[in-house]
Image (cartoon, helix red, strand yellow):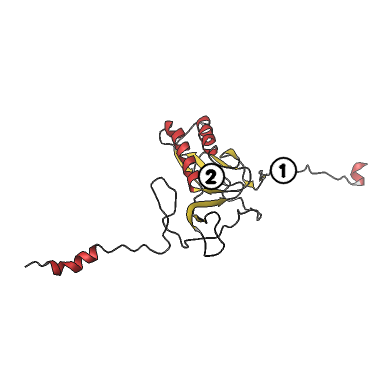
Amino acid sequence: MFSLLSALPTLRHATAPVSIPNGTFGARFRNQIAPRKVKYAKRQKGRIPIPTGGSTRGTTLAYGEYGIRIKGQGVRFTAKQLATAEEVIKRAIKVVKGAKLYMRVFPDIPVCIKGNETRMGKGKGTFEFWATRVPTGRVIFEVGGVPIREEIAREALRLGAAKLPTTYEFITRNSPPRLGNMLIEPLSPSIPPTPVTTLEPSQAS
């Protein structure tokens, strides 16, 4: 005979709260760009990196045919800014069937903020939003996937750049890499010098 008392342990186990793994926090909605899991719940503010080592990685196109990269100073993007720009660019390239948008940066740094007029101490503030630090010359968005007219890609990326801080430049596959504020132009092939024939005194006479 079925007894309600015998089913109590099963019911109690079914309604137990699910434990969240360590390192997972923050709301992640459908329209929010956020990592699924991070190692540390809170991080220091940090500084925007400056490319002083001579590396040009991330300053040229890798997936698409056209793109934009930072021309002004480095900046810290928030997840909301990147999501807004991504939505605007996707809406603009929708007229081209099969066109794709590639985002080369991702907000994976948690930013914590304390309230105004709060006394010092008592730990770090609470989680507020996701962000990422991007240096000068880094590519932000790329458009490609299928052959697309340059006018459409330029206008779509211009609308997306208007939603982001700092200044940008439109680049193609032929654009040279950038090291900070300098463009690394390819070396032109040098013309070998014409060999000079030296005449001996006997031959000159």
Nearest the eye: 74 or 149: 74
In what quadrant of the picture does the C terminus appear? top right
Do callouts 2 and 1 mark residues in contact (Cβ within 8 Å)? no
Q: Nearer the viewer, mark 2 or mark 1?
A: 2
Give the x, y percent position of residue 179. Answer: 64, 48
Q: Which residue is mark 2?
A: 140
In what quadrant of the picture does the N terminus appear? bottom left
Residue placed at 39% from the left, 49% from the top?
29
Give the x, y percent position of residue 147. Answer: 47, 34
Nearest the eye: 65 or 137: 137
Nearest the eye: 71 or 150: 71
**Residue 20, located in which quarter of the rendered image?**
bottom left
19 relative to 197 in the view: left or right: left
- How crowded pointer 1 is (Cα within 10 Å; few <14, some 14-19, many 20+) is rated as few
Residue placed at 79% from the left, 44% from the top?
195
Circle 1 sits in a helix, a strand or a loop, which is it?
loop
- Between discs 2 and 1, the one toward the N terminus: 2
Give the x, y percent position of residue 172. Answer: 56, 38
Kindly tell me whether residue 145 is visible in this rendering: no
Q: Which residue is mark 1?
A: 190
Q: Give, as a three-letter code, the residue at label 2.
A: Ile
Tell me: residue 28, above or below residue 68: below
Give the x, y percent position of residue 111. Answer: 51, 55
Residue placed at 50% from the left, 44% from the top?
81
Distance of label 2 from label 1 (alpha carbons): 35 Å
Tell me: residue 96, above or below residue 197: above
Q: Give, as a three-letter code, the residue at label 1.
A: Ser
Circle 2 sits in a helix, a strand or a loop, which is it?
strand
Kindly tell me whether residue 152 is visible in this rendering: yes
Extreme residue toward the left, this view:
1
